Amino acid sequence: MHLTLILLSVAIAGLVRVAWSSPSGGWLNRWQRALFAFLLPPLLLLTTAVAVLCMGTQGQMLGLPAGWIGYLLALSFLSVAVGWLLRLGGLGWQSLRQIHAYPTVAVGEAAIGHMLDTAQMFAAQVGFWESELVVSRGLLDRLTPEQLNRRPSPTSKLMSTPRYVLVFWDGMATPLYRLVAQH
C-alpha cells in the first residue's frame, strides 16, 4: 500500500509539473498558478513520505499489505530532503557571514546594504528571516540617485500581491555563494 501511495503522489506531482503552461490573465492569477505549480509537487511528495513513515510497516489497507519497500523509500526520500535542507542552510549561513565582512553603504535615501567590490551589476536580498541588501559597486556607479530612491507607490499592483516567499533552490543558492566567496 505504501508503494502505491508513493507512486500515486509521484504521478500527480509529475502531471502538475508537465501540465503547467504559462498562465494568462492578471498578475494575481498568474502568481497563484505559478506558485501552485512550483510548490504543490514537492509538498505532496514530502507529506506522502511523512504519512507513510507515520503509518509504519505493519498491517494492510484496502486489502493491500503495508511493506518495507515503500517505508524505506519514504525514509530515504526524507533523509535526502533533510540533507538538502541542511546543505542549503549551511550555504546561506556562510553567505551571510561573508556578506557581513563587506563594507556597509547607503543605497539611496532609506536603504542600507553591503557593497561587493566588483564592476558587475548585481543586487540581492540575502538572508533567512531578516534579509540584508547586497549591491555591487558597478550597480551603484550605473544607477542615478533618482533610480536609487524610487519606491513603488502603496497603491500599485505590486504592493497588493504577496511579496515574501522563502524558496531555497540549489541552482540559485550555490552561484550566489560562489559570487560572494570570490570577492
Image: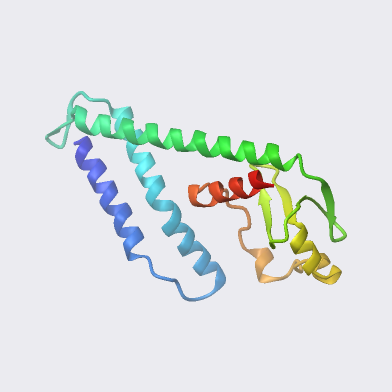
Q: Nearer the viewer, residue 136 or 19?
A: 136
Q: Residue furthest top?
A: 58
What is the number of callouts on the image?
A: 0
Query: Residue 20: which quarter of the image?
Result: bottom left
Q: Is residue 7 above or below residue 17?
A: above
Q: Nearer the viewer, residue 9 or 17?
A: 17
Which of the colour schemes (rainbow, by chain, secondary structure, one colour) is used?
Answer: rainbow
Query: Residue 127: which quarter of the image?
Result: top right
Q: Residue furthest bottom?
A: 25
Whole-percent x and y of residue 51? 33, 34
Q: Nearer the viewer, residue 43 or 64?
A: 43
Name the residue at 34% across, 59% down. Answer: 16
Q: Residue furthest left?
A: 63
Name the residue at 75% across, 40% down. Answer: 100
Name the residue at 84% across, 51% down. Answer: 105
Direction from residue 64 to residue 115 in the image, left or right:
right
Name the residue at 33% across, 28% down. Answer: 54
Q: Nearer the viewer, residue 134 or 137?
A: 137
Whole-percent x and y of residue 4? 20, 41
